[in-house]
Amino acid sequence: MHNFRYTMSISLFLLASAGCNNDAPDQYAGWTMVNGNYTGNKYSSLTAIDTTNVQQLQVAWTYRTGDADTAAHSQIQCNPIIVDGIMYAVSPQLKLLALDAATGVLKWAFLPYDTAGSDKKANFNLNNNRGVAYWSDDKDDKRLFYTVGEFICAVDAGTGKLITAFGNEGKVDLHEGLGDRAAGLFVTATSAPTIYKDLLLTGTRVSEGMDAAPGHIRAFDVRTGQMKWIFHTIPQPGEPGHETWEDKDAWKMTGGANNWMGMTIDQERGIAYAPTGSAAMDFYGGKRLGANLYADCLLALDALTGKLRWHFQYIHHDTWDYDPSSAPVLLTVTHNEKKIDAVAQTTKTGFVFVFNRDTGEPLFPVVETPVDTATELAGERLWPTQPIPQKPAPFVRQSFLEKDINPYLSEAEYEEVQTRLLSYRTGKMFMPGSLQGTVVLPGFDGGGEWGGPAVDPETGILYVNASEMAWILKMEEVKKKESRNENYLQAGQRLYQQHCTACHGKDRKGGGNYPGITNAYQKYDKASLIEFMNNGRRMMPAFGHLKQEEKEAIVSVVLNLKNEYQRKFEIQQTAADLFRQLPYRFTGYDKFLTKTGKPALAPPWGTLTAIDLNTGEHVWKTVLGEDPVFKEQGVKETGTENYGGPVVTKTGLLFIAATKDAKFRAFNKSNGRLLWEASLPAAGFATPAMYEVNGKQFIVIACGGGKLGTASGDAYVAFALP
């Protein structure tokens, strides 16, 4: 087993933090916004906890929300904020909480269900929520903004009551401005909105399939909820970028290109740096030929007007779901002996891109590199090149060959993996999806994920955690029916394959992070499952756009309602229905695992890497997490898949939870050595927050579990020195 921890020489540059001056308050001393401060660097300048005493950390308080739902795989992905000694956070069922940040005592809780017009939680989409935004007029008006289902809610930070003067009785519908075709389509937001002056900027999460709404970025007035501007991420006729879509009417039907991962706003420049996701559908682009601006881009938008300043496209005509996975980070680096204000982006592919904040010029060379375009999928035409940064080097592995098979498998397991590997397309990144299956490494969940990196503003060193897990991208042909003379069984099977197979699998046993639904009849009847489909929940988008008869046909198959199978299925197809029909479908989010559930790829499956962005050189790398199955076999340094980001401190520490082994760890930021760890009540798939109250320093982490096969939890746990 190789030792994955290594140390390289560190170049220390004492850089002024972006936008700071000696007279300004220390923006790094608190945690008043998601990711800590407006640079998004997850850095704390507090000094009470350091490398000499971190081993003394202990639980200061624990708050349990009381609404975890293990059956529904509930989660808490929230990075809480702390304002004037009050911590604002979100529960698994999307209650907004105000806690005394020193004691964890509840001050108030806002239950959002009435904002959706019902007191039943099942009647709206319980989206995963990664945080809230705070705004104040520096007088008495103090507001919190967060997303519940399709609504942005405005809540009084002092009372926990809806501010009814905002939007429609306290909420704004995220469908606003997206056009008539978005009506009934799934639209929500997992990331917190972002504040610039008196504007609330937001992206969205939309479906990944052909039923995706457009992912346009908008700004709303923080007081009234009125939409002030919109940027079309899928350009319309006459707008720059429209020419990158071969079908000039694609904007009328195509969705996605959405800012689901949040954005970072340079408050001094007034520039919003907003990454965008892939265009729909993720894995077949035959109905969206071209480079597909502004999908898979970093957009630099004028935060006041929404006008485009510059853009960079990370992936051309994406068919791997390789969109950037987190909000970018602002920092200042020394490059060619000059101080440059930069914006850095980590990615699912394991690349780090670093740009001049003003011009968009890459600080390290980016080469348009020829890639494999040989595809057997009719109608598809892949882009011939992809942009590859020459520095920094990738922070994860990017290919899977026979030498990369997990050496800790049994002989039978090894042979099984070897046989399957030989049957797949593999060996490099950007290989086309295929009918026999293509190995995707980094996998669909990274590389870098939505937690994003931390950056030390004094040194320009970036710290990024990553998952290293191979997945299989497999497509299958959709056989055209000459006639739609179907019964409910035939229609339900066809529609299930079209809309449900990718997540729940052909056999309804699930895959990846998606649950099986073979026993759905134990929880749902026909009416409640249709209601669930109408509204969605967490990872599952809403299917309100499907016609009632289509939903009934799907439900008849999922719930095995044999008495309905022979009902005649008759439905008129619209232009949108015809557009959404593809010649191929994605077979599901399948990790490359053995039949016994072990990773086919050799460890480490979770890593933590420090990269000097002044020079582009790696500083150190270590494993992150321990796999309990292999730990019992005596295998060390396995790492685990991980979700959530790190916090780095002025005093030499890096804190991170994120792993499925439910540990909270502190590393020495200079060399990657583990200094402290504690067990959590559930896995902490979230980013910690560091703050100070009455001179006492705390670090808090949401322990929600619910991913990677872990039990759901309901706790926020704060640690402090005795």
Image: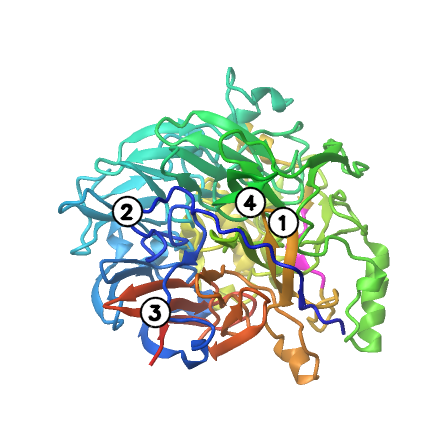
* Camera-nearest residue between 497 and 421: 421
Spatial separation of the CA atoms under disc 1 and disc 3: 49 Å
Q: Which residue is mark 4?
A: 345
Q: Amino acid at mark 1?
A: Gln
- Disc 1 and disc 3 in contact, CB within 8 angstroms: no
Real-space Cα separation, disc 3 to disc 4, in angstroms = 28 Å
For disc 1, the marked residue is 497
* Residue on which disc 3 sits: 698
User: Residue 217: where, in percent of width, then height?
Assistant: 43, 34
The answer to which of marks 4 and 2 sits earlier in the sequence is 2
**In the rendered structure, are the residues bearing label 3 and label 4 in contact, judged by CB atoms less than 8 Å apart?**
no
SS at badge 2: strand
Amino acid at pointer 3: Phe
Nearest-to-viewer mark from 1 and 2: 2
Residue 209, visible in the rendered structure: no
Query: Residue under circle 2?
Result: 153
Q: Residue 144 lies in magenta, yes or no?
A: no
Out of 125 and 20, give the one closest to the viewer: 20
Whichever of labels 1 and 4 marks the residue nearer the N terminus, that label is: 4
Q: Position of residue 49 (x, y in %)?
A: 39, 71
**Residue 331, relative to residue 621: is it above or below?**
above
Asked if disc 1 and disc 4 are in contact, CB closer than 8 Å, the reply is no
Disc 1 or 3, which lies upstream in sequence?
A: 1
- Find out whether residue 591 is within the magenta segment: yes
**Foreground tag (4 vs 2):** 4
The answer to whether residue 705 is visible is yes
Q: Within 10 angstroms of label 1, few (less than 14), some, or many (20 or more) residues?
A: some
- Segment colored magenta: 586-592
| Residue that sits furthest to the top in the current view | 238
Determine the residue positioned at 81% across, 53% down: 424
- Circle nearer the N terminus (3, 4): 4
